[in-house]
Amino acid sequence: MHFLALTGLLFLLHSAIVGEDATLDNERRIVVDRDALLTFIQYRTRELEPEQAEAELAGLTDAELQQVIDSYVSEQALAREARALGLDRTDYIITRRLVQSLEFISRGMADADSEPTAEEITAYYTANPEEFFVKPRVSFAHVFFSGEDRGSDEAMSLAQSALEKLRAEDIAISDGARFGERFLYGANFVNRSGGYIVKQFGLAYADALFDPETPIREWHGPLLSDHGAHIVFIESLEPGYLPPLEDIMERATDLTRSALGELRTREAVQGIVDRYEADIRYPEPDA
C-alpha cells in the first residue's frame, strides 16, 4: 500500500511543479512568486520540508534575495530554452537530471512515510547485526626499531635484544620507550580499532595484536611492521560485541528509517515503471 500511495502522490506533486512551466514553454515571461522561490530553495538545498524553506526565504537579506531571484530566473530561462530545443528528449544528461529530480521527490515522500514501528526496528536489528557490532579495541605501548636504513633483519635482532632486557629488568610500560627509537606516531595507543592498527602498522601487526594467544600485560615480540620492528605491551584488549537493542535504540531507529525510506522509494519508482511497457529490441531474438 505504501508504494501505491507514494506513486499517486508523486504524480500529483510532479504535475504541480511542472504544470505552470508546461503552459509557459513558448512564452518569454518568467513568474517569480513566493511559491516558485520556495520550490527553488527546496531543490537547491535538497530539503523537502516546507517549513525550513520558508524560514530560509524569510531570513534572506535584500541582497541575498536578489541573488536567489537572479539564479531562479537564469535557471528557468535556460531550462525553457533547452526544452524548446528538444534537449529534454535527446540529451542524456538532461534525461538523467529529470530522473534524479523525480527520484528525489519520491525519496522525500518515502522518508515522510517511513517512521518505523517497534517491530520494524527489532526486525532490522535482528537481520543486520553487522550494522551494530562494536569492533574489538586494543590499548598498548611499543618499543620501536626502525628498519628504514638498517633493514628489517637487523631491526628484529635489536628488538629481540631489547625484549630480553625489558623482561629481565621488569621494565614498566611507561618506561619502555626509552629502550628503543622515536616512532613518528607515538609510543602509546589507547582504545584503537583494528582498522586503525592496519592503517598505521600493517595487517600482520594488527593480526598479532588481536590474536587471543598474544599475552596481555607483558612485553611481547618482536613484531614486524611496515616501519620496522616492535616490542609491544598490551594493556587491554576489549573483544567485539553486539550491544543490546535498548542501548542503541536511537541509532537503530535511524538506520531502520533509512532502510524503509530506500525500500519505499524503490517501490514508488517501480510503480511508475510498471505503468510502461518495455519494447526490447536488443539483443534481437533468435530467428
Image (cartoon, rainbow, N blue to C red):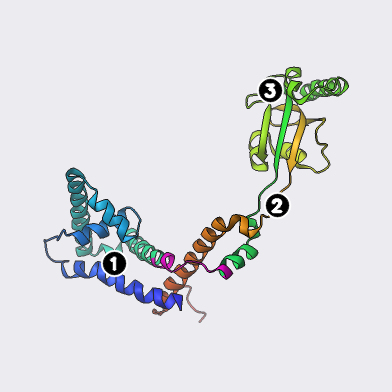
Alpha carbons under labels 3 and 1: distance apart: 61 Å
Residue drawn at (46%, 67%) of the image: 114
Mark 1 in CB contact with mark 2 (< 8 angstroms): no
In magenta, the rendered stretch is 109-119
Mark 1 lies on a secondary structure that is: helix
Mark toward the viewer: 3 or 1: 3
Mark toward the viewer: 2 or 3: 2
Q: Which residue is mark 1?
A: 89
* Above or below: residue 185 compared with residue 264: above
Please, what is the three-letter code of the amino acid marked with disc 1? Arg
Please, what is the three-letter code of the amino acid marked with disc 3? Glu
Alpha carbons under labels 1 and 2: distance apart: 54 Å
User: In terms of sequence position, does the residue under pointer 1 or pointer 2 come before the other?
Assistant: 1
Locate residue 98, reporting x and y percent: 33, 63
Mark 2 surroundings within 10 Å by alpha-carbon count, few (fewer than 14), some (14 through 19), many (20 or more) = few
Residue drawn at (30%, 64%) of the image: 90
Relative to 157, 282 lies left or right: left
Q: Which residue is mark 3?
A: 148
Please, what is the three-letter code of the amino acid marked with disc 2? Tyr
Mark 3 lies on a secondary structure that is: loop
Residue drawn at (61%, 66%) of the image: 122
User: In terms of sequence position, does the residue under pointer 3 or pointer 1 come before the other?
Assistant: 1
Q: In the depicted view, which residue is nearer to us: 11 or 228?
A: 11
* Residue 111 falls inside the magenta stretch: yes
Question: What mark, if any, has residue 241 been given in the picture?
Answer: 2
Relative to 74, 283 lies left or right: right
